[in-house]
Amino acid sequence: MTIQLYNTLSKSKEPFMPLKSGEVSMYNCGPTVYDRLHIGNFRASLFADTLRRMFEFNGMTVRQITNITDVGHLVGDGDDGDDKMTKALKRANKPLTLEAMREVATIYFDEYVDDLRSLNVELPEKFPRASDHIQENIDLIKILETKGYTYETSDGIYFDTSKFSDYGKLGRSEGSKLENFNSAPLNPIPYSLYPTSNQSRIVINPEKHNPTDFALWKKDGKVGWESPWGKGFPGWHIECSAMSTKYLGQPFDIHAGAIDLIPVHHNNEIAQSEAAYDKPLANYWMHNEFLIIGNSKMSKSVGNVITLQTLQDESISPIAYRYWLLTAHYRTPINFSFEAVRGAQNALIRLMATVSDLRGQTDVGTPSMAYIERFMTYINDDLDTPQAVALTWELIKDTDVLDADKLSTLLEFDRVLGLGLVNVPGAVANEDIPEEISALVDAREQARKEKDWTKSDALRAEIETRGYAIKDTDKGVRVTKE
């Protein structure tokens, strides 16, 4: 079955043709580990994970690389100001040393991986760290220097964008608007949500030959690595080019990330990589839309961040957040509210209760090929997860499908949806219990899986308060009326 993907480079959906039959090479921009990530950041992680799962559902092998930026990313994403890791050191009252920077980065990297696991994200093949690839960055800059694409200023080595004729082909940043992006989007993000001219990522520097020129190497006499251009650290953009090419070659199949990376970071990656090697960096560029809260995208600079821990403090499961994102297409903005995510959690609880009931009544049967084919039609059409979720509920209500086959088909769907249905235990009960009690039981089971014992104990107490006894057995949970 043909896979159609929206390619930001061509501004259209295209049939996916991998470089190597049966294999997909994919690079998605990971975080700068200077603070804990917020749930807006994780929309990109979940998009990449769903994309990977779709390919695997189609029988393909995926080589996925997610970089970790632990040096070189300036606060404003431009070429001036503090390095984000330096900001983290100041916040933690740590000395300005590479060793302390590594220590702080590792703390936030470990938290990031823990959060990915709580979202049931399949971890990539590698998490290369920028600080481990300084030589690769230097080597790439040398190639660009030899080919005449660079010039030196008092503060660093810059890429001359006027010498790369295709600069900005992914989408140009003009003032406050992003031109040439998603000319036929599902639901384009309002221009008001892009950086205004006062917040532009392209910083005016009198030594730059062109406003769009960007740093390949930043000089720093206090901290950094030795290089032919003096002590310092690589620019943010060069890191991704060096690491993606090292692990996937050039070109590779798919480069993914959030849409705010298009006008500067991804255009700069394309320019330096293609100038160096005279061939495309990636054949398909894919971008997810923003998570919106109020009238702004969620970001640390705005101060409207919500973490996964915030959700858990509100008794909302990370998997419920995953389910909620699946109900919107990755190329549409989605407006966050606690009410909306709680509604998604209620739907997830009902879905898990259905799987639990089916497990308690029947063995796993044979997947319904009619439903599998429809499911593949949706997910292969540029990851149409809202239709895939709707199909899940259609299957549950279909009385013509045997329970055993229904269970098997739901578990097949979940290979892409990633909701952890395979881990839902079968319900064991000697009597019918009300729907609201069943929902509490399922919520308790989810809390136990997440090792949230405080929440699990509170839900048990609530169940007992309502007059029901709950017992954990080797065959599942037994609930009886007291």
Image: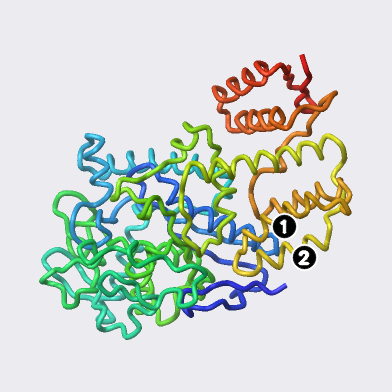
Residue 373 has which mark?
A: 2
Indicate the amino acid at tag 2: Glu
* Residue that sits furthest to the top in the current view: 482
- Eyeballing the image, is 123 above or below 77? above
Q: Position of 93 compared to 190: left or right?
A: left
**Res. 118 in view:** no
Q: State the residue at coordinates (64%, 63%).
A: 55
How far from the left and from the top, in percent, is residue 162? 25, 82
In the picture of the structure, the residue carrying the numbered disc 1 is 391
Q: State the residue at coordinates (46%, 45%).
A: 337
Tell me if mark 2 has few (under 14), some (14-19) or many (20+) residues whose alpha carbon lies within 10 angstroms of its own: few
Q: Nearer the viewer, mark 1 or mark 2?
A: 1
- Eyeballing the image, is 77 above or below 346? below
How far from the left and from the top, in percent, is residue 163? 26, 84
Indicate the amino acid at tag 1: Leu
Q: Position of 172 compared to 417: left or right?
A: left
Q: Position of 253 compared to 98: left or right?
A: right
